[in-house]
Image (cartoon, grey):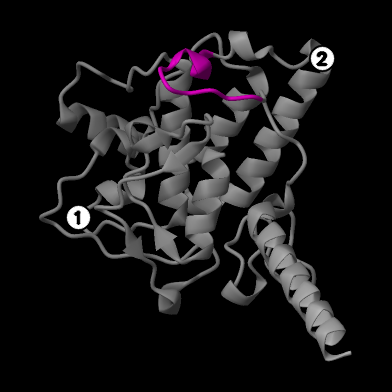
Amino acid sequence: QGSRGMLFLHNQKCVHRDLAARNCLISSTGRIKIADFGLSKLIDEGENDGDGATAASSSNAQVPVRWMAPETLKKQPVYSVRSDVWAFGVMAYEIFNNGVKPWPDDPVKYVATQIRKGNMPKMPASTPPKVATLVASMWDVAAEKRPGMRMIGRELHNIIKEQTATLGPLKNDRLTINKIKGVAREAHFEFDDTSEFEESSGSSCSMDEPTPDNKIDRSADKKRTRGSKTARRASSQREKASTDK
């Protein structure tokens, strides 16, 4: 769900720039919602070189160093959808590390040096191997080599689907998310809609690139909304025709 939310933002030409576990909210039904857009920027399509375009940085902004990509820690920082991908990897680290951020006790200057060198912490032992491999690809120092959110979402979907097929779905009372007061999630994972992670028909974009605005795949909810509106119009027309008769 986090990757779906980020893919939607990137499709809207928006770079979040502050993605972290603390900025992901949980709804009463246990759904993840991306929040806190105080540092977000619209990307400049004029500089789009295939890896998601860029957004300039404000030197006065307070930046979350532990979640930042190497290219954003330079004298002239460059933010892009690929720097969000790096942060998504750090967020995955937080999740598998029981919410503990990387280098929790080290000074910011040391942390920035480690990131620039690509010396990222090892994923916790509890991390599934395929997830650890995926996170490693998100932490590639070369921004253009990182996967896009579309690819990440598809890979995560496949990993969870394989895990569920092997172990079976978790019962509701075993879901950690349901231990949060006021949260009641009914399904471990939903496999019914993966349209966001598939290439748009007729689109020349790769799975890693943001889809052009006129090619954005809409969510199942929006499809159902359009279908409902069409059904209501058809019903209204039938009623009118019946009245005319």
Q: Residue at x 20, y 44 (%)?
A: 63
The reply to whether callout 2 and callout 1 are in contact (CB within 8 Å) is no
Q: Residue at x 84, y 86 (%)?
A: 241
Specify start and end residues of the magenta stretch as a single range: 176-186
Q: Which residue is mark 1?
A: 75
Question: Which residue is at the front of the view, 177 or 21?
Answer: 177
Q: Which mark is residue 166?
A: 2
Q: Earlier in the sequence, mark 2 or mark 1?
A: 1
Q: What is the x, y in percent for residue 24? A: 40, 36
Give amino acid for label 2: Thr
Which secondary structure, mark 1? loop
Q: What is the x, y in percent for residue 7? A: 55, 53
Local crowd size for mark 1, using a 10 Å CA cut-off: few (<14), some (14–19), many (≥20): few
Give amino acid for label 1: Lys
Q: Is residue 159 above or below residue 97?
A: below
Question: Which residue is at the front of the view, 215 or 229?
Answer: 229
Q: What is the x, y in percent for residue 54? A: 38, 65
Q: Quadrant of the N terminus?
A: top right
Camera-nearest label, 2 or 1: 2
Q: Quadrant of the C terminus?
A: bottom right
